Amino acid sequence: MKIAITRLEDKAAGDRALCASYGHDCYTVSPLRAELRPERVASFVEAVHRGEFDCLFFSSALPAAIVGPRLERWPRVIAIGPKTAEVLREAGIEAEVLPSFYSRDFVPYLGDWLRGRTIGIPRADVPNPRLLEAITAAGGKVREERVYALVPTGTELALDDADAVLFTSAMSYREARWQPRDDLLLLAIGEITADAMRAGGHPPAVVGDGSLAGTLETLNRYLESR
């Protein structure tokens, strides 16, 4: 299949090779673009260097790419997924990897260690109140620094040549301009994105585990059973 994957521009490294390994081709469509906030990046990095955090949590690869190379020292570091960990490793930072691709598993992963600790989270300007509430309820403190904004591109997704479209976040679905077709297979990278698609009237045929590889595996099982 030819799959259109929603990604930020220039952030699709490795997608095509991974898709090919599952027997598919893919290309990038960008309903969003990242707008960096340099002053917030600098403020967060300075706080890390002052030792204000007991742990840093990177919930996607982009904040890891923005903040990681600027760090000279760091506390315990947790990453979502091997891709985010790989970006941090390129900056010389070894990170622990959550057992799932969902932020909701951050607090259970840390368990009692979290009590009395301060967590730093660099992220997009997209609220995640459940994560913050969970950290506080577990006895931790948290500073969430929104180091970049996600801005709709306003460009209609080029889907004429696609057999399927994969939405990689709830926001990429909600902000996308696109034309559904009866023969266009709808894919969601994970449960949160799938819930947004269902709420918007476009239930996905395939729901992944939060990763591209997991979504492609699920897609192939779906195609085999069809």
Image (tube, rainbow, N blue to C red):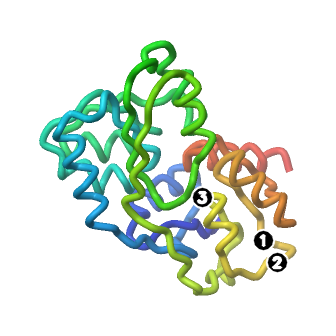
Counting other residues with Cα less than 10 Å from the Cα at mark 2, is it few (<14), some (14-19), or many (20 or more)?
few
Q: What amino acid type should be assigned to the residue bearing mark 3? A: Thr
Give the distance between the C-alpha atoms of the residues marked 2 and 1, in whole angstroms: 5 Å
**N-terminal label among 2 and 3:** 3
The answer to which of 185 and 107 lies nearer the viewer is 107
**N-terminal label among 3 and 1:** 3
- Which of the 4 image quadrants contains residue 188? bottom right
The answer to which of 16 and 85 lies nearer the viewer is 85
Q: What amino acid type should be assigned to the residue bearing mark 2? A: Arg
Q: Position of residue 13 (x, y in %)?
A: 38, 61
| Label annotation for residue 168 | 3
Q: Is residue 179 visible?
A: yes
Closest to the camera, between mark 2 and mark 3, is 3
Point 43% across, 73% down: residue:
9
Furthest-bottom residue in this view? 155
From the image, tell me which residue sits under label 1. 184
Q: Position of residue 52 (x, y in %)?
A: 26, 35
From the image, tell me which residue sits under label 2. 181
